[in-house]
Amino acid sequence: MNALSSVGDHLRARSRDPRRQLTALGPVAALHAGRMPWRLSQLMVGLTLYGLSMAMLVRATLGVLPWDVLHQGLTTIVPWSFGTVVIVTSIVVLLLWIPIRQLPGLGSLLNAVVVGIVADLVLAVLSEPNGLAARAVLMLGGILLNGIATAMYIGSQLGPGPRDGLMTGLARRTGVSIRVVRTSLEVAVVVVGWLLGGVVGVGTVLYAVVIGPLTQLMLPWFTVPLDPAPKTPAPTEG
């Protein structure tokens, strides 16, 4: 119990550290905020793990990430691999940033490409496990890994992913809370993806419930302190 208490105290201390707060930076300012080798390395590791986690949930066959329901559904109507659909969808979502005046950062552009490539590479070598227990372990591991990966790429402070940026941009332009915008978008893509043949299951529901708290827990560990630390905090969910 003492060890768990110490870890909890350490996490709370890190979350209150102003150097560990996300900051609202434009794409150019983010590139000049220092510590680029560290931030870029963390970004690439995070995106790689994100693609790996997506593939794990696909192979678990117990339900995929909300946006991946749409990606899976689209693979039934276009002759493309899952990863290619992820990349093309990401590019389309980035184009939707234009009318809401959302500017992509380096992380946004790399996210659009790297995640899909990694997902296809992993799907090529990872087989669907036998037995419900093995599939459940793969599903849970994929969700946990996705939370870590999300905290890593967000914490690099090099720009949100295409879908995250669409969410925050719509919230900023409409005045609606991020929570409502995110829920509305994810419900819409899940319904469309399911109608097209995407897999909705316990993994989809569990992910939707735990990914926010899980990412919030991990962010203090992976938010890279900027040098010098900007004073403008990034918006949070409301």
Image (tube, grey):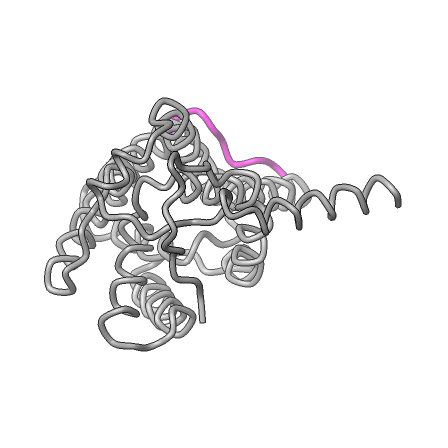
| Image quadrant in which you'd find residue 80 | top left
User: 141 left or right of 208?
Assistant: right
Percent from the top left, x then y, of residue 114?
30, 33
Using the image as rendered, state which of residue 87 and residue 198 is in the foreground. Answer: 87
Q: Which residues are magenta?
A: 124-130
Task: Quarter of the image for the C terminus: give it.
Answer: bottom left
**Residue visible at 24% across and 41% down in the picture:** 29
Q: Is residue 129 magenta?
A: yes
Using the image as rendered, state which of residue 53 and residue 64 is in the foreground. Answer: 53
Is 181 located above or below residue 28 in the figure?
below
| Image quadrant in which you'd find residue 220 | top right
Task: Quarter of the image for the N terminus: give it.
Answer: top right
Is 181 located above or below residue 34 in the figure?
below
| Image quadrant in which you'd find residue 93 | bottom left
Using the image as rendered, state which of residue 138 and residue 129 is in the foreground. Answer: 138
User: 39 left or right of 88?
Assistant: right
Percent from the top left, x then y, of residue 184?
35, 73
Percent from the top left, x then y, of residue 136?
63, 46
**Residue visible at 22% across and 39% down in the picture:** 109
Percent from the top left, x then y, of residue 21?
48, 49
User: 193 left or right of 141?
Assistant: left
**Residue visible at 43% across and 34% down in the picture:** 46
Q: Main secondary structure of the magenta part?
A: loop
Q: Is residue 221 magenta?
A: no
**Residue visible at 38% across and 74% down in the picture:** 177
Number of residue marks: 0
Q: Residue furthest right?
A: 1
